[in-house]
Amino acid sequence: MIKKIEAIIRPEKLDDVKKALTDIGILGMSVMHLEGRGRGAGMVIHGRTGDYVIDLIPRLMVVIVLSERNVDTTVKAIKKGAFTGEKGDGVIFVSPVDNVIRISTDEEGHPALQYQGDIDARRK
């Protein structure tokens, strides 16, 4: 089965997450800039001209589509790279993917996910 991991992380932890993923053989990923909030309702900044509520914090979303057998290893790598021990370290979502189609080669399913030297090639 194919899975999608969406990890929302602190922007300053991106290099650590990318390194942790590369170290285990995850080569393909997408990164998107976003704003959001989790359990916290944001923060109030007191200025000379008044109070400002900042309730949407800049974050990054790292998206990876991979084989189900690689999910646990990948989640551990993301957690290792994103961890600061403070509130707001992020969240990871894992969901099923019905199909993957590589446009350039018309490959579908698992073959469309493979890269030379990736985590699956290392497991053989």
Image (tube, grey):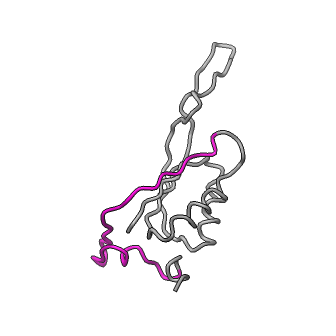
Residue furthest right as drawn: 85
Q: Would you say the magenta stretch is mainly helix, strand or loop?
A: loop
Look at the image and give the residue range highlighted in magenta.
88-117
- Left or right: where does residue 120 sit relative to residue 110? right
Q: Is residue 91 magenta?
A: yes
- Residue 40 percent location from the top left of the image: 59, 31
Image x and y of residue 82, in percent:
64, 53
Decide: is 79 above or below 105: above
- Residue at x-position 64% and y-position 65%: 20
19 w.r.t. 114: above or below: above
Residue 96 in the image, given as x and y percentages of width and height: 38, 59
Task: Tell me where residue 41 appears, x and y as whole percent.
Answer: 57, 27
* Furthest-bottom residue in this view: 124
- The answer to whether residue 71 is left or right of residue 107 is right
Looking at the rendered image, the quarter that the N terminus falls into is: bottom left
Task: Identify the residue shown where x is 30% and y is 66%.
Answer: 99
> In this rendering, would 89 be left or right of 37?
right
Q: Can you say whether 102 is above or below 75 in the image? A: below
Q: How many marks?
A: 0
Magenta-drawn stretch contains 89? yes
**Horizontal side of residue 77 vs 120, given as left or right:** right
Name the residue located 65 percent from the left edge and 50 percent from the top edge: 12
Q: Nearer the viewer, residue 88 or 3?
A: 3
